[in-house]
Image (spheres, grey):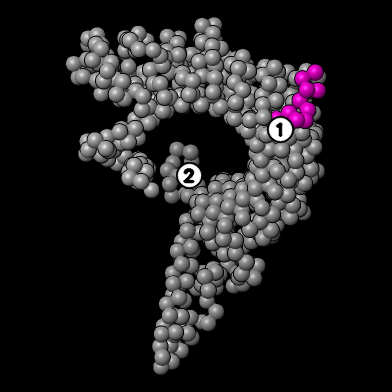
Amino acid sequence: MNISELRWNIFQMVDTNRYARNMTLLALALTCKSFTGPALDLLWRELHGLSPLIRCLPSTLWKLDGLKPNLRFIRAMTLDDWSIFCKYNHRVQAFHIISPDDHLVSPEIWRTFNCSPFPLPLLPNLTSLSWSAHGSERFSYIRLFVTHKLITLKIRESYNFDFGLSEQSILTCIPTLCPSVSHFVGSDKHLGDTSIALQCWSHLISVEVGNISEAAILYLSNLPSLRVLRFVLHPTPIAADTQNLLQHPAFCALQELHVLCQRLAPLGAFLETLTITPKVLSFAIDKGENSSLALTALVLRLSNVCAHSTLEHLRVNIDSINADSISAVTFEPLYAFRNLRELEFRSGYVVALDDATLLQMAKSWPLLEMFRITGKYAHKVTANSFVSLLQHCPRLTSVGIAINWSAVDRRGISSDIPYQGFTHTALSRADFGCSRIRHAITIAAFISAIAPKLISIVAWQDDYADEDPDFPDEDSDFSKYPSKWEVVQRLVESFSMVREQERKMVLNAGGAVGGDASGCGKDSEDDSGGESDSSFSLDSEDE
């Protein structure tokens, strides 16, 4: 490794410390000439707004004033000012104009930059541009920054600004100024139709947009480079001719597909003829049908559309009100996806899960890391099947499911260790939904014994209103009435600390035995009981 490579590696290590980054790089730039170039390159590599560039210009050029600070020019820019600007502009590779500070740059500054004495773009080496449109004039200045080197382009607009014809024309022309874009984001609903722009880029790797035309969908389906697609599906089902064209090898390299639509029918039509091999599938339906038949048909279609060996993450979010119940039959087609790492199913349907269904899921998806099924539960899943889920899915870190705790929810803590001492050391987060409990300490002892690494528990219920005659009215202070699940959370944390103390005591006792040559460590061994280990003992909680 030569000196320049070593110097660059040192500067990159400094660049990872975001707290001291700017001051350290500035100090390095002022140290010596050999440090100046690399340090300034890193210092200016990513720029948030125009303000930093403007403030590097002579203080006689600009002024910051007003109750709401407003950055403005107080004289015209000279060629000397532009030469100073050019010391920094070529170092910028990523430019983000989305922060509130960007509003504080006066329009006259924008107009001045629009009349630069050198050829555009203003930042010639820019490879990433994030632009938030807050007005018609402001959006027109995006042309000052798009370069042939641009790879990532993100365009968003403020909530109170809709794209008009002039903005749409600019958006249509942008691909000719930056033909190398491979990552495009323009997902806000007011952005307008990005279909024409999309069909001008031939190297797209990831696309995140709103509504697009069927022609744009077909174009994207034929791109061999496309890996990630997120879009809003039109509420009208796609035409039969388009369906026929969406056949293999459509979306041949797609690894992630995220679709937002209003109802299940258009989504089903879109998937009708597809054959894809994604790792991630995500569907969000705004107005899910009340009938569960459409959902059952969609899940069955997924089993036919996606390669069983590749799908690892499946997320379905359906906003349904007063919907039917869904049973085990709905989920059965998903059992074929043996490599699932994440299953998230959120809906307004009544989810009629039972022990047998959950056990089948656990056996079908042994690689699960996140499992969440939320809805209006029938509470047929018991603590026994919950433990079976943990036993069959050793990698599970997050679970979200309502549990019927009645078999565990007793007044006294059992003296027996649950499930012969089985512990699941990967689970760290649990959402038990609307699971009702009566005895927090018993539930906490059980959960802590089964999942000793659990750090976050989310659940809710009306704990005291039906049980405590002195429960306060709605105007009273509820702080002295913590949720029973909040009590469970605190107890599990406490049990974890006690267990760690016990583990250290055992280790210390073992060390005393091993280190005493005279054999006097026997008393210490007896004190430890000879059977203590790092697992939770319910006997200790009884005591």
**Extreme residue in the bottom direction:** 518
- In this picture, which residue range is highlighted in magenta? 241-251
Q: Residue at x 59, y 30 (%)?
A: 205
| Residue placed under numbered mark 1 in the picture | 252
**Extreme residue in the front direction:** 2
Identify the disc placed on residue 454: none
Q: Earlier in the sequence, mark 1 or mark 2?
A: 1
Q: Residues at badges 1 and 2 in contact (C-beta under 8 Å)? A: no
Q: Quadrant of residue 261?
A: top right
Seen in the image, is 187 located left or right of residue 336? left
Q: Position of residue 92 (x, y in %)?
A: 38, 27
Q: Position of residue 154 (x, y in %)?
A: 50, 24
Seen in the image, is 29 located left or right of residue 212? left
Task: Please say whether residue 299 is visible from this viewpoint.
Answer: no
Q: Quadrant of residue 293?
A: top right
Identify the disc placed on residue 472: 2
Q: Nearer the viewer, residue 411 or 102?
A: 102
Q: Nearer the viewer, residue 164 or 93?
A: 93
Dot 2 falls on a residue whose secondary structure is loop
Spatial CA span between label 1 and label 2: 61 Å
Q: Position of residue 243 (x, y in %)?
A: 78, 23
**Dot in front, 1 or 2:** 1
Q: Residue at x 27, y 18 (%)?
A: 83
- Label 1: how many residues lie within 10 Å, few (<14), some (14-19) or many (20+)? some
Q: As shown in the figure, which amino acid type bears the numbered disc 2?
A: Pro
Q: As shown in the figure, which amino acid type bears the numbered disc 1?
A: Cys
Magenta-drawn stretch contains 60: no
Relative to 255, is 62 above or below? above
Relative to 109, is 479 above or below? below
Task: Please say whether residue 180 is visible from this viewpoint.
Answer: yes
